[in-house]
Image (cartoon, rainbow, N blue to C red):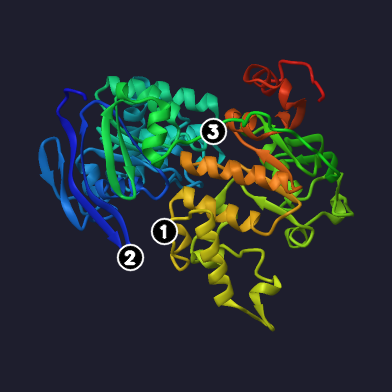
Amino acid sequence: MSTNAAAVRLQGISKRFGAVQANREVSFDIAAGSVHGLVGENGAGKSTLMAILYGYYHADAGHIEVDGRQVHITNSQQAIGLGIGMVHQHFMLVDTLSCLENIMLGAEGGFFLGASKARVREKLEALMAETGLQVRLDALVGELPVGELQRLEILKALYRGARILILDEPTAVLTPQETDQLFVTLRRLKERSTTIILITHKLREVMNLCSTVTVMRAGQVVETRPIADWSEESLAESMVGRKVTLGRPEGMEVHAGEVRLQASGLSLKHANGVPALKDVSLTLKAGEIVGVAGVSGNGQSELLEVLSGLRAPEGGRMDLGGQAFTPETWLDTAQARPLRLAHVPEDRHAVGLVMSFPAWESAVLGYQDLPKYRRGASMNHAAMREATRAMQERFDVRPRDENLGSAKFSGGNQQKLILAREIGEQPTVLLVGQPTRGVDIGAIEFIHHQLRALRDAGCAVLLVSSELDEILALADRVVVMNCGRITGELAIEDCDEKRLGLLMAAQEERVAA
């Protein structure tokens, strides 16, 4: 344990939401100037606890000390005044404003904005030079890559005086390169005596960055120990309460069958005319998982959108379920479900769920016209609720409340609800993007098992993941994308991280499986 004084002390914190006990008598210290890991399964109470520290929620019992003084935090403005900043998993930014304007929003500092902007710019330029957090202050937020948005959120918190920084799943949407850059920044902030609370499911990040780790399970603290006392295996077991097995099972055989989806010559341009897909051809076969590897932003997302019917390409053809689709008569999402094509989107908030819906409505989205959900001309809401309860049980969605709003579930539990919906109807083709983004290690093991079981039942699975470990653990065949085109295709036995990395950077000649 660090010998530094406690920047934050949590004593007996409890919080209940209706029948759900989110936190139960949580107590631990966070040493000043340390990186303190907070880990646990989805629904363990980590984000709720940090929301209490940041003033979003009020604890039912217990108290908080900041810098040795007991405080009563009733809103985020008070937290900011105490030097606490929070960077959320889903960024809190306005796309139509510049970086500078987003930082100033709510802290304009005077009636004359021109003078305020000049003062803020000067302070931010000094802060960027000191921390290495470089952002383009005049660029519109909606046009920035996700790594720069992450830096902007941290810079915004530091500008407002944060000495204690809460990061909730900070690398969930970052590329490996952006993650490495973030680590450099966090180490530099630690050298400036910034206290960092890191909520993450990625155990390598915990082992590389943290000095102390607190494990939570079912709303309670299991244990708090220095990082030297942990291994990845012991940490995973403490989080889940049992041994966890990840990676590729030995002796896993591939039995690819008939072609289920054939795409050829797909081309697509962004709104600004820049090509997003360039002559992409792909075959998906029954009983096979095809992994798509590549640095984010190289056409993987657009490929999923085209194949799922969310967007029509400008050129190319797709054969699915005995039907041929061309740009003029492209597949739409209403056609996809009867053709038994399911889609787990990369962005669960924008595409996978309706955040204002209760869980039982989100759990049947796109399938609401199935006979089992109808009663004559009307929807059978009772059947939908019953089906949702079964999904929540099978996929361990917490809490088990089909009436709870979709927005009130943790990110990992939202993901499990979408997977339960899409996998549950036994598709013949499954397109899945980032299936374990923001998901805890126990759920990763479960989701991987479900995807393998679906493949073994004869489904053709296309897997897009930014995690090479996940591609190597699940895929039977791997295609690599760079700048909108496929730069390589390999059988899994020919894959390793080095070779895939070269193909991702287009530094190796195109090879075919």
Specify the farthest residue to the left.
69
Q: Is residue 394 above or below residue 190?
A: below
Viewport quadrant of the C terminus: top right
Q: Which residue is mark 2?
A: 19
Amino acid identity at mark 1: Pro
Marks 3 and 2 in Cβ contact (< 8 Å): no
Apparent side of residue 47 relative to residue 12 in the rendered image (left or right): right
Q: Is residue 244 above or below residue 415?
A: above
Apparent side of residue 499 relative to residue 231 in the rendered image (left or right): right
Residue 131 in which image quadrant: top left
Question: Which numbered mark, 3 or 2, is in the foreground of this view?
Answer: 3
Specify the farthest residue to the front.
251
Residue 216 or residue 50, whichever sits in front: 216
Marks 1 and 2 in Cβ contact (< 8 Å): yes
* Number of on-image labels: 3
Residue 399 is labelled as 1
Amino acid identity at mark 2: Ala
Residue 362 in which image quadrant: bottom right
Q: Is residue 84 above or below residue 494?
A: below
**Nearest to N terminus: mark 1 or mark 2:** 2
Q: Is residue 369 above or below residue 485?
A: below
Say few, some or many: other residues with alpha carbon within 10 Å of mark 3 (under 14 / 14 to 19 / 20 or more). some
Say few, some or many: other residues with alpha carbon within 10 Å of mark 2 (under 14 / 14 to 19 / 20 or more). few
Residue 146 or residue 135, whichever sits in front: 146
**Nearest to N terminus: mark 3 or mark 1:** 3
Question: Which numbered mark, 3 or 1, is in the foreground of this view?
Answer: 3
Identify which residue is drawn at 76% across, 26% down.
491
Q: Which residue is mark 3?
A: 246
Distance between mark 1 and mark 2 Cα atoms: 9 Å
